[in-house]
Image: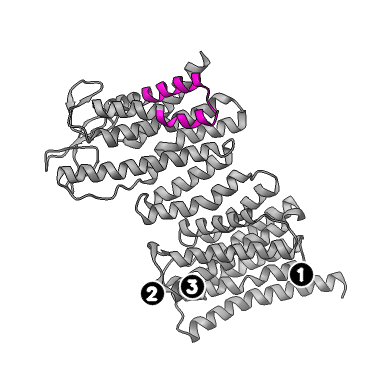
């Protein structure tokens, strides 16, 4: 068979198979009792053969790109034409369309880069089609023995994504002699698991393929080091554990995961990652203990302290930005500012959590008037002492690893403590404080007692997270200025 006939045969096989997948899905929908989720995921799984068809007939060619475009169009017509009505019973029904669209876009990017990254498209494709495809099937089969991590996400469903994705990467590495390391293969599987776990319904059909393919490209061009591989492998499961234990909300887990990805990629080795992990672990432990002690002492129900996504961003945004700037400029001061910013946030957290256990008065740092405990801008002797100790304690970490010398350690520890005072000052001057007429309490929440309390000071748009970001910026700016002197 000559090349032209072989190419025509490839077009025919691909088109017939793509249309056949959708027709078979409609037949399964009509003739069986499978629910819409099973129909969708079954389509995911059997669609995986299309990559093999393209590999056999076309390889990395313009025909491969065109046929993926044809597949995306066929899926779009089928989806938006309502030919598979089960896709509309429990959601918007766009998941399979996103599946075809993401595969088409990845094919375009690969064609533009070149054949050297062609096999990576297959890995990304199978992580999506098989990993995301088998997860709900296994979760449904093990429903009675399957702990829920959060609504819609189960333990065995997530483990299935991880296991199937790992097997997909391993198969490609062995069959095509790609020589991928075991840790790297685990990291690809963990990334797939993380995106499927946190991805919005349907949108994960785009995010999985894009994320995995992007990660593989970073690896191919030499941007994935050992530290980043470890972070990508471990952090998704730690975030899931934090969500399951209610240490983090779902948004908190997403933001923490992204923060660790940024630190792992842009950090100069493993020290920044360990530093950030140590800070989060220590802060979470202290918060949990002090909250329980405070609740028991005050005679209220001890509720689990759960950090939100906004709080995680408030803690790490400025420090992460400093690390990114250091990565592109190689200016050592910005590397030091990463540690300073995290230390200041840790010290401020210790001042708030431990300080409220003290029996002394809280005084507004600007107005010098007594305020209720827990109101931003208030400082106490115990809280201030804890902030001072925490500032010097946490920065021992980069000192031990010789990131900082003694002079820098002493200066930055003092500036971190100064940053907690700046935080209190910003809280007093700018953070919104409300008075609730219904109960007579002052609160930092814009809604209270099912009503809208009256603003008594500060600005409505500035809350605790905004103050944390502003104080983090001010602290790092002060640190840079002093070091430059």
Picture quarter with the N terminus = bottom right
Q: In this view, does 440 lie to the left or right of 472?
A: left
Residue wearing tag 3: 138
At horizontal 58% and vertical 80% (from top left) the residue drawn is 23
Q: In this view, does 77 lie above or below 270?
A: below
Q: Which mark sits nearer the N-terminus, 2 or 1?
A: 1
Expressed as whole percent of the image width and height from the top left, the position of residue 408 reads: 50, 21
Place of residue 435 in the rendered image (x, y in percent of width and height, measured from the top left): 17, 36
Q: What element carries label 2?
A: helix
Tell me residue 200's x, y (percent).
46, 58
Q: Which circle's residue, 2 or 3, is located before the other in the chain?
A: 3
Q: Can residue 143 be seen in this view?
A: yes
Q: Is the magenta stretch mostly helix, strand or loop?
A: helix
Q: Which residue is under mark 2?
A: 144
Identify residue for label 1.
Answer: 56
Of the two numbered discs 2 and 1 in the rendering, the one whose residue sits closer to the viewer: 2
């Amino acid at each position: 068979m000559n090349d032209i006939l072989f190419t025509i045969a490839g077009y025919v096989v691909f088109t017939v198979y793509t249309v056949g997948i959708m027709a078979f899905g409609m037949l399964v929908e009509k003739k069986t009792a499978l629910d819409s989720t099973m129909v969708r995921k079954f389509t995911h799984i059997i669609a995986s053969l299309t990559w093999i068809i393209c590999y056999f007939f076309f390889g990395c060619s313009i025909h491969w790109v065109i046929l993926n475009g044809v597949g995306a169009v066929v899926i779009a017509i089928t989806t938006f034409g309502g030919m598979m009505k089960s896709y509309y019973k429990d959601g918007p029904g766009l998941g399979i369309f996103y599946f075809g669209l993401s595969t088409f876009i990845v094919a375009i990017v690969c064609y533009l880069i070149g054949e050297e990254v062609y096999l990576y498209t297959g890995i990304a494709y199978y992580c999506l089609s098989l990993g995301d495809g088998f997860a709900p099937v296994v979760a449904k089969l093990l429903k009675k023995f399957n702990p829920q991590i959060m609504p819609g996400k189960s333990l065995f469903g997530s483990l299935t994504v991880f296991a199937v994705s790992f097997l997909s990467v391993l198969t490609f590495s062995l069959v095509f002699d790609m020589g991928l390391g075991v840790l790297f293969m685990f990291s690809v599987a963990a990334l797939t698991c993380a995106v499927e776990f946190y991805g919005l319904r349907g949108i994960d059909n785009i995010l999985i393929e894009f994320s995995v393919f992007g990660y593989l490209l970073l690896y191919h061009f030499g941007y994935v080091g050992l530290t980043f591989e470890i972070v990508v492998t471990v952090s998704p499961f730690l975030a899931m554990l934090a969500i399951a234990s209610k240490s983090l909300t779902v948004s908190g887990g997403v933001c923490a995961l992204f923060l660790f990805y940024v630190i792992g990629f842009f950090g100069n080795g493993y020290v920044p990652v360990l530093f950030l992990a140590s800070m989060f672990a220590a802060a979470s432990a202290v918060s949990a203990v002090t909250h329980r002690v405070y609740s028991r002492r005050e005679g209220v129900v001890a509720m689990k302290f759960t950090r939100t996504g906004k709080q995680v961003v408030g803690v790490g945004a400025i420090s992460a930005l400093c690390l990114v700037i250091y990565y592109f400029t190689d200016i050592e001061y910005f590397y030091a500012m990463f540690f300073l910013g995290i230390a200041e946030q840790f010290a401020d957290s210790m001042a708030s959590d431990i300080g409220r256990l003290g029996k002394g008065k809280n005084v507004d740092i600007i107005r010098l008037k007594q305020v209720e405990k827990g109101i931003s801008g208030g400082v106490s002797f115990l809280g201030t002492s804890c902030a001072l100790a925490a500032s010097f304690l946490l920065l021992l970490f980069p000192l031990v690893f010789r990131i900082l010398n003694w002079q820098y350690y002493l200066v930055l520890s003092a500036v971190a403590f100064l940053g907690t005072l700046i935080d209190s000052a910003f809280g007093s001057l700018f953070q919104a404080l409300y008075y609730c007429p219904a109960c007579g309490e002052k609160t930092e929440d814009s809604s209270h007692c099912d009503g809208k309390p009256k603003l008594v000071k500060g600005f409505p748009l500035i809350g605790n997270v905004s103050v944390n970001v502003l104080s983090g910026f001010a602290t790092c700016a002060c640190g840079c200025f002093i070091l430059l002197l």
